[in-house]
Amino acid sequence: MNDVRQVYIDKGHSLLNRHYYESVQADFAEVKKEYPFCFLTIPPTVEPQEAKIYVVAANSQLITACHAVKEDFLGDYSKELWLSIPADYKDKGCKVYGGPWIDINRIPEAYRHFYMAKGSDKNHGYELCVGVPDSFRSLKNVILENIRTAEHLLIAYENYLCRNTDTIVVEGYSHGDKGIREYDKNRKKYKST
């Protein structure tokens, strides 16, 4: 077993690092408080694999106020999200998928904060942009912040597609280096506590 562990570590697979799993579980405990309709999966496999989270992005305050159940958020504008949590998620963030109902042809290009998902993840909708890579290191709980950002995106797209608003209102940055520069100007504003 030690030989297998060393091979994976040598190839850059730090998923065997106990710290990764403990960190994911600790962050997930906070997520569960705010988003009670969620599940964490850590595959019990010999070869290390990324942890996954399924969450219905409806926060506990909304659920309590509306006496809601999970199914209330699974209709035409489903709030379901699927997250893949890489070993370096605290630096690079999570892969977040959702919004298969988003009609890309009705969203102006400037407001498309998502990409076409690839492989098996395409069944979960789009890969949502949930932050500027340099921002993640300053966050206390990257998983929670990625879910909050995705929730805000889904709400903004739903409001736009339902014609509740003429504009898509999301606080975001440009993609790539331009977005990183924009974030750097506002770094203190977004530091988590």
Image (cartoon, rainbow, N blue to C red):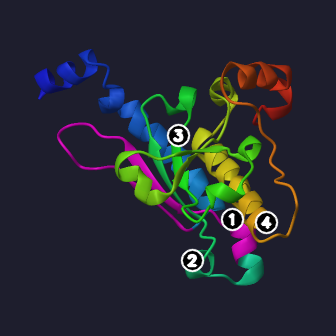
Q: Earlier in the sequence, mark 3 or mark 1?
A: 1
The type of residue carrying mark 1 is Asn
* Residue closest to the far bottom: 67
Instruction: Name the amino acid, label 3.
Output: Cys
Please give the residue where the numbered disc 4 appears in the rendered image. Answer: 159
Q: Earlier in the sequence, mark 1 or mark 4?
A: 1
Q: Which residue is mark 1?
A: 59
Say whether residue 23 is left or right of residue 133. left
* Image side of residue 54 versus residue 50, left or right: right
Question: Horizontally, is 103 left or right of 164 in the view?
Answer: left
Secondary element at image label 2? helix
Rendered image quadrant of residue 106: bottom right
Quadrant placement of the N terminus: top left
Q: Amino acid under label 4?
A: Asn
> Which residue is denoted by mark 3 in the rendering?
94
Mark found first going from the N terminus, 3 or 2: 2
Which numbered marker is on residue 1? none
Q: Position of residue 44 (x, y in %)?
A: 24, 49
The vertical placement of 3 against 99, above or below, is above
- 93 relative to 60 in the view: left or right: left
> Eyeballing the image, is 189 above or below 74?
above
What amino acid is found at the position of numbered circle 2 in the picture? Answer: Lys
Nearer the camera: disc 3 or disc 4: 4
Q: Earlier in the sequence, mark 3 or mark 4?
A: 3
Q: Is residue 14 above or below residue 145?
A: above
Circle nearer the viewer, 3 or 1: 3
The alpha-carbon separation of the residues under discs 1 and 2 comes to 11 Å
Marks 2 and 4, the one that precedes in the sequence: 2
What residue did someone put label 2 on? 70
Q: Alpha-carbon distance for marks 3 and 1?
A: 19 Å
> First in sequence: mark 1 or mark 2?
1
Q: Quadrant of residue 167?
A: bottom right
